Image: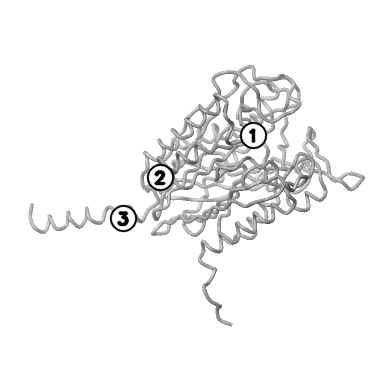
Amino acid sequence: MTPLRTSLLFCLLASFPAALGQNLLAGLARIEITPSTNGPMFGYANRKCGPSTAVHDPLYAKALVIEAGGQRVAIVTMDLGSISTEVLFKRVAGELKIPVLLLSLSHTHSGPAFMAYSLKADNPSDYQVELEGKLFEVVKRASESMSPARLSAGRGAIQLGYNRLQVREDGRARAVFNNLDRVPYGPVDPEVMLLQVEDLSGKPRALLVHYAAHAVVLGPTNCLYSADYPGVLQARVEAAMPGVQAMFVQGAAGDINPLFQGRTGESQTDFATMTKMGELLAAEVVKAAKKLEPITPTPASIVQRTNTLPFKGRWDAAKAFPVGITTLLINNKIAIATVPGEPFVQLQSRWKTAAEVPFAFFYGYTQSTPNPWPGYIPDMKSAAYGGYGADNATNIEVGAAERIMDQHLFNLYDLRGMWMAAPGKP
C-alpha cells in the first residue's frame, strides 16, 4: 500500500468513531409479558368474573435505548395497568449503566393485578418477580443492539375520548363512566404525537405513539387478558409499516375515557368495539407518519433532570406521597415530561402550551424513580369540583399537579441554559 493510501485509510478510520459520536445511537427489543397462569385482573372493583379465564391477545414490553453526548436513556412501554419497582431501577442503573429508566404503562384494565402496595414487600407475587426479570432482559437486549440512528417527530389528531367528569345540578362533578352514545363531553387533547427512530438511511425502526385516553374499551365484564385498544393500535401500525416496532405511550388520561366502549357483556361484540377504536387510531398514526419532521442536529444531544417531589396526603397530612418525575430534552427540539400515576389532561395541555419547543411530549403513567404509585393527580380546578379521581378515589394533596408542572418547566429552562448566573441586560 502506498504512503498516500495508508494516510487516507488512517484518516478514515480515525474519523469514524468521531462521526459516530455526532450521532444518536438507538437499540430496540421486545418481550412478551403475558402471565402464564390465570389470576386477578387489574382496574375494576366491580369486575363480574373474578380472576382471568384466558388470554385474548398477548401483552408485551418494548424497549428503546437511546444515547447521545454520553447520556443513555431507556424507555420501556408496557401493556400493564400500573407498576412500582425498586429492583428494576437498581439493576438497570447498576448492571447496564443506564441512569435514566422510563417505565411507561398503557394502563390497560384487562391486564394482571400483581403490584404490592409496599415497594419492600416481603413476598412479591411470582408474576412481579418474573416481570422484573423480563423487563431487565428487554432493556439489556436493546442496549446490546445499539446502532447510529436519527429522529423524526410529528403529529396528527383524532378525537376518540371524552372527559368523564361532568358538573351536575348540585354544582359538583361526578363521573360518566358509560357513554354508549359517544357524546364528546368536556375538554380533551385529541392530538396524536409521534416520535420515530430511523436508521441513517431514513428507514423507520421504531414509532412511539403518544395519545391520551384510558385503555378501558373493555369493561368489567371482560375476563380475558388483553392490551385493549393500544394493543390493536400497535399491531396495525406494525402491519402497515413492516420492520417498525410500534410503542404506545399513554398521556394524561386520568379524566379521559374512550368514546368506544364494549359494555354488552358479549365477548365477541365487545372485542370488535375495542378493535374498531384501535384501528381508527392506527389509521391516523399511519397517515401522520408520512409527514414527520427530521430532528437531526449535529451533534445529537440528550440532557435530563430527575426530581422526587414530596407531597402530603389530601385527607391525611401525615401520609407521604413522593412523586418522581423526569424532564428530557433531546436535540434541543423534543421535550418529554414524565409523570407517574394518573395525571389529568389539563397537565398535558399546560405542558404543550408552555414548553416552547417544537415537540412537547407528556408521558403520563410513567415511573422514572422507584417510588410508590401515586394514583390520581388532578389539577386544582378538578380537585375543587370533585368526582372520581378528583376528590373521590384520590389521595395526594391539592396543588400537587401544579407543583409538578412548575418543576418540569423549571427543569426545561435549566436544560435550555436559560437560568443565568448573573442579572441580564436592562
Residue for badge 1? 117
Position of residue 277 in the picture relative to residue 122 (left or right): right
Give yes or no for contact between labels 2 and 3 (Cβ–Cβ under 8 Å): no
Residue 360 in the image, given as x and y percentages of width and height: 58, 54
Q: Quadrant of the C terminus?
A: bottom right
Looking at the image, which is closer to me, 405 or 288?
A: 405
At numbered mark 3, what does the secondary structure look like: helix, strand or loop?
helix
Looking at the image, which is closer to me, 4 or 417?
A: 417
Q: Residues within 10 Å of mark 2 (few under 14, many from 20)?
A: few
Q: How is the image coloured?
A: one colour
Identity of the residue drawn at 55% across and 35% down: 78
Q: Amino acid at mark 3?
A: Ala
How far apart are the alpha carbons under marks 2 and 3?
23 Å
Res 98 → quadrant: top left
Identity of the residue drawn at 64% across and 17% down: 53
Residue 26 in the image, given as x and y percentages of width and height: 41, 45
| Marking on residue 97 | 2
Q: Earlier in the sequence, mark 1 or mark 3?
A: 3
Residue for badge 3? 19
Against 331, is 393 above or below?
above
Q: Earlier in the sequence, mark 2 or mark 3?
A: 3
| Marking on residue 193 | none
